[in-house]
Image (tube, rainbow, N blue to C red):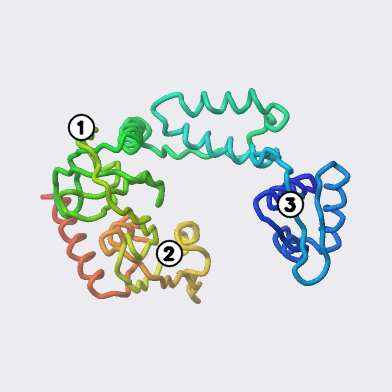
Amino acid sequence: MKIDRLIGILSVLLQEEKVTAPYLAEKFEVSRRTINRDIEDLCKAGIPISTVQGVGGGIRIMDGYRMDRTILTSKDMQMIMAGLRSLDSVSGSHYYGQLMEKIKAGSSEYVSGSESILIDLSSWYKESLSWKIEIIQMAIEERKVISFDYYAPSGDSAREVEPYFLIFKWASWYVWGWCRLREDFRMFKLNRMDRLMQTQMDVTKREVPMPDLSTEKIFPGDINVKAVFDASMKWHLIEEFGPESFRVQDDGTLLFEHEYTDEDGLIAWMLSCRDKVTVLEPESVREKLLHITSEIAKRYVISK
């Protein structure tokens, strides 16, 4: 929409001392002629914009002009509201709901009744998550250490952590912070925590790196998987890995080839596919699946 582009151009001019028409044309994906017309419209609206041709020239707002830089479009407000609604889905308090009402009350001309984007971040675990998120948020704000019992594949442990970031990724919630037990930055899954509480211990001042959220970093290890799936599992492969992850063979079965990062997760996934998959590679996974299924079969042998 033109009004959104005009507000966008104005926002750029308020933040930059001087810009060029080609720069604005590329940023807003329109022609230079369109930018020139937009600048004329802004001038007609009373915005004192000066343009200088030639080397060293450009477009700028005249000195001394001031304007509220927080001006938002209807689309901007819709995105803000969608974000607040998503956070409210896991909030243990009514804070986000109250904040949404404040925004609506003060911006009725920008916020319509239409809610076309609905995001629920709570999954199946809202009751167990909301109070944990609230405790960790408070600890981050007050710069206090949190303590909890942690249950992981490597074993159970008691942890004291200096929390810095709450993270939602891979369909789960995590906290990123300095682990006093391991003396390093670690990421902990909220669903694996128990007896979480905020302590009275202060967080130590330290340089805090941004967490590396790449899948390869969190789930290291490249496992080249090759398997044959029944044709009925096509939807499953597309949902998990996309239509490029397999090839339909002459007999209708699906030859799946993909990289996987976590062997335990891979085995669990293959077992969830029941008898609809045959793993071809790697051999180590085939052996583990054989051992697991053999042990399962022993438990269900019907004695005569």
Which mark sits nearer the N-terminus, 1 or 2? 1
State the residue position of label 3: 9
Asked if 288 appears above or below 99 in the picture, the reply is below
Crowding at label 3, few (<14), some or many (≥20) Cα neighbours within 10 Å?
Answer: some
- Residue name at image x 33 percent, y 71 percent: 222
Q: Which residue is tagged 2?
A: 230
Kind of residue at disc 1:
Gln
Type of residue at label 3?
Answer: Ile
Residue 137 seen in this snapshot = yes
Quarter assignment of residue 113: top right
Tell me the residue at 54%/39% (across/down): 83
Residue that lies at the very extreme toward the left in this rendered image: 304
Q: Mark 1 or 3 closer to N-term?
A: 3
- Report x, y in % for residue 62: 77, 50
Residue 200's mark? 1
Residue with the most extreme front position: 64
